[in-house]
Image: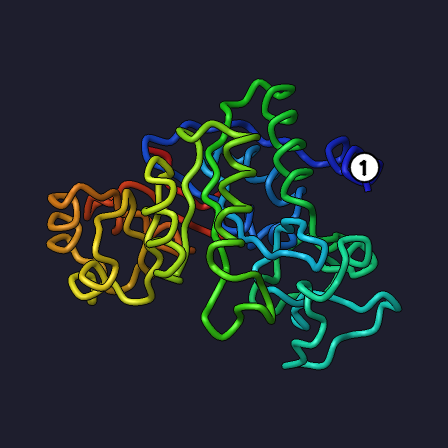
């Protein structure tokens, strides 16, 4: 695994670093260009000038934090150890029921993704969070790039507790413990769609910055009532944001960082509304400002 990482660092094409006046976040690294949530995706994102790396976490049976959007091997992006495809809709390759040593035999980088035709294809595995952070930090130092921020999503749901992931307290404690030991809090925020996670971390670790993930920006008033505290970041799907809602949310003391914005025109429109950042699969399309 370490040899593969060093090889990829050596062969990744470099691009000129660009400064952005807003928080440019690479979604799952840069999913439009590289296999998602892999170390090469994060390094490519740094080359493109992102200020924040957005990523997702799952947990293995032996309690290891793994970078993965789903808590299972997604048939759309992963192949079995024998290189055969996983049947669409099959969620039985459950990361929470596997030891970490089993994961590297699954290739999650070679399948063609119809949603991202320009994505590079190569054998890629789901990395340990520990390995990803170590490689990213070294790469930024070696390339004289600014130290990145990390927007880390805790992927959980009531239905998945004890089946696809640990319960809220165990999962959250594990992530916060890693952050406290390995990163500066001023370069990290934790995010989740699961308000139970946000409430637990806010009550237990009040210094940890939080981002509230939501599907519909039009429901922000009800969402904030349900959460019952004001997080540092409000992070909605971008389509229902308006200049008025951005102003109102700013008045409440939050930054607004919408997801997942994949055209330059959409990004420019949102920046004109006054958002503080953009989460995108294509940081190469971000307007320079």
Q: Is residue 285 left or right of residue 3?
A: left
Name, please, the residue furthest toward the right: 82
Say if residue 35 shows up in the picture.
yes
Residue 13 coordinates in the image, percent (x, y): 68, 35
Depth order, front residue of 98/69: 98
Say if residue 260 shows up in the picture.
no
Quarter containing the N terminus:
top right
Residue name at image x 49 percent, y 31 percent:
148
Residue name at image x 78 percent, y 74 percent:
85
Residue name at image x 67 percent, y 52 percent:
63
Quarter containing the C terminus:
top left
Q: Is residue 101 above or below residue 288?
A: below
Rendered image coloring scheme: rainbow
Residue 185 coordinates in the image, percent (x, y): 42, 31
Q: Quadrant of residue 136?
A: top right
Depth order, front residue of 234/17: 234
Q: At numbered mark 1, what does the secondary structure look like: helix, strand or loop? A: helix
Residue 38 coordinates in the image, percent (x, y): 65, 48
Q: How many marks?
A: 1
Residue name at image x 63 percent, y 49 percent:
65
Q: Pointer 1: what residue?
A: 2
Q: Is residue 103 above or below residue 91?
A: above
How crowded is the residue under tag 1: few (<14 C-alpha within 10 Å), some, or many (20+)? few
Q: Quadrant of residue 271?
A: top left
Depth order, front residue of 129/62: 62
Residue 40 coordinates in the image, percent (x, y): 67, 42
């Amino acid at each position: 695994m370490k040899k593969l990482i060093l090889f990829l660092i050596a062969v990744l094409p470099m691009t000129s670093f660009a400064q952005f006046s807003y928080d440019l976040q690479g979604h799952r690294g840069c999913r439009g260009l590289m296999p998602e949530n892999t170390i090469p995706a994060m390094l490519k994102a740094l080359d493109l000038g992102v200020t924040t790396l957005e990523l997702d976490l799952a947990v293995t049976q032996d309690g290891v934090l793994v970078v993965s959007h789903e808590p299972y091997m997604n048939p759309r992006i992963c192949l079995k150890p024998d290189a055969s495809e996983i049947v669409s809709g099959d969620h039985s390759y459950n990361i929470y029921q596997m030891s970490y040593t089993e994961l590297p035999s699954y290739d999650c980088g070679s399948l063609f993704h119809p949603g991202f035709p320009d994505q590079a294809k190569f054998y890629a595995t789901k990395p340990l969070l520990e390995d990803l952070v170590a490689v990213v930090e070294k790469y930024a130092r070696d390339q004289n790039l600014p130290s990145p921020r990390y927007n880390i999503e805790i992927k959980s749901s009531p239905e998945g507790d004890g089946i696809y992931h640990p319960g809220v307290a165990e999962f959250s404690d594990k992530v916060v413990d890693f952050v406290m030991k390995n990163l500066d809090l001023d370069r990290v925020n934790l995010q989740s769609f699961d308000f139970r996670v946000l409430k637990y971390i806010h009550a237990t670790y009040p210094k940890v910055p939080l981002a509230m993930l939501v599907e519909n920006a039009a429901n922000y008033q009800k969402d904030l009532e349900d959460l019952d505290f004001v997080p540092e970041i409000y992070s909605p799907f971008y389509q229902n944001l308006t200049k008025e809602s951005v102003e109102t949310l700013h008045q409440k003391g939050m930054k607004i960082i919408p997801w997942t914005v994949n055209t330059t025109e959409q990004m420019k429109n949102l920046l004109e509304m006054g958002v503080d950042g953009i989460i995108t699969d294509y940081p190469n399309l971000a307007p320079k400002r």
